[in-house]
Amino acid sequence: MYWKRILHIFAIAAAVSMAAAEEPPAFTVAWSIYVGWNPYHYMARSGILRKWADKYNVRIRVQRFDYAPSVEAFVAKNVDACTMTNMEALDMPAASGVDSTAIVVGDYSNGNDALLVRHGLSLHDLPGKHIMLVQKTVSEYLFERAFTLNGMQDQIRRVHLVNTSDSDIVTAFLSQDSEEAVVTWKPLVTQIARTRGISTVFDSSKIPGEILDLLVVRTDVLNRPDGSGVRFAKAVTGAWYEVMSQFNHGGALAEKAIAGSAQASNDTVASFREQLATTHLFSTPDSAESFAKSADMKAKMDLVRRFCFAHGLLGEGTASADDVAILYPDGSIQGRKDRVRLRFDAKYMALAQGGKL
């Protein structure tokens, strides 16, 4: 009887071990509310993500955060992938020494970010004025690009920036008639612009492709020896482009995808559509891959990295913008070859385009 009990115990241990070995590896994608990232909510709720995860024998959870905490969780390696702008990909994970790879170029802001004014002011009236914005973000980048493109770069220092959180900026600006200018993003822009006497003097449609929205994965996750990181990347990319195909489809299928994405931020479909209208979605893998491989993107990323360096956003002790280097799909590198921290990998988008996912 004793030996039978021993065999029984061994059998149970073996079964538990086998079950553990067969458990699919788990991954977490962090996302935050924004028109270009809300589809991740719909992707999970609709079952599309689960279908692709099962295909590649992985488990994928999408977890909502506020924006800054989402990128902080990524930097801390508490999540495996995160939606973020190209600027944050440089000034947070890359600047912190976290090697990261952008696998999906989702969209660019094409009017979502804007500089608004009161009292009929023009851009040329703003030197000497206060401007409310979230400093050291794409809002400050947009403000500086507005001045530079209008030949006013020497006037940037004359403007008084008032650092204001995105959660407070609408109320703070609308409740103080003495505040004459503000920079923010939709849907906050829409809320402010509804007020009589407020107009837009510059928006991101004037700098197309400079404010990019990406899905970024830690490079060490992609390079896992068991290949699970690559399977994860294929699954989430496949799910993303299935959702995009629904957006493109029209009819009831598109309505379902748009309504499900709007629900992510408790938004109305009409409001979400208004935001989509000023978002350039790379809704096909071909369009995303082409942009990722273009010389145009390199030029725009160069502007962003130089802004980040000029504002001390690339980490302490960084001597130049080249100290946080960017690797592009063609193998070219902006910066020092031994300091690559941000990579753009177009192969998953190419696989989606070729129907090979």
Image (cartoon, rainbow, N blue to C red):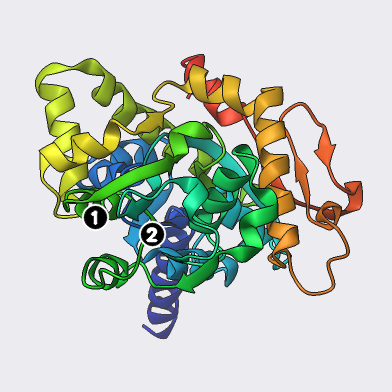
What residue appears at the point 46 percent right and 73 percent down from the top-left corner? 162
Q: CA distance from mark 1 to mark 2?
A: 9 Å
Q: Position of residue 181 (x, y in %)?
A: 39, 59
Residue 209 picture quarter:
top right
Q: Does the image show residue 241?
A: yes
Using the image as rendered, state which of residue 163 and residue 69 is in the foreground. Answer: 163
Using the image as rendered, state which of residue 189 and residue 92 is in the foreground. Answer: 189
Q: Position of residue 326 (x, y in %)?
A: 75, 45
Residue positioned most to the bottom: 2
Indicate the quadrant containing the N terminus: top left, top right, bottom left or bottom right.
bottom left
Residue type pointed to by label 1: Ile
Q: Is residue 119 left or right of residue 99?
A: left
Residue 346 picture quarter:
top right
Q: Are marks 1 and 2 in contact (CB under 8 Å)?
A: yes
Q: Is residue 35 left or right of residue 308?
A: left
Residue type pointed to by label 2: Val
What residue appears at the point 71 percent right and 30 percent down from the top-left corner? 329
Mark 1 sits on what residue?
Answer: 192
Which mark, residue 182? 2
What residue appears at the point 41 percent right and 85 percent down from the top-left corner? 2
What residue appears at the point 57 percent right and 65 percent down from the top-left corner? 136
Q: Position of residue 40 (x, y in %)?
A: 32, 46
**Earlier sequence position, callout 1 versus callout 2:** 2
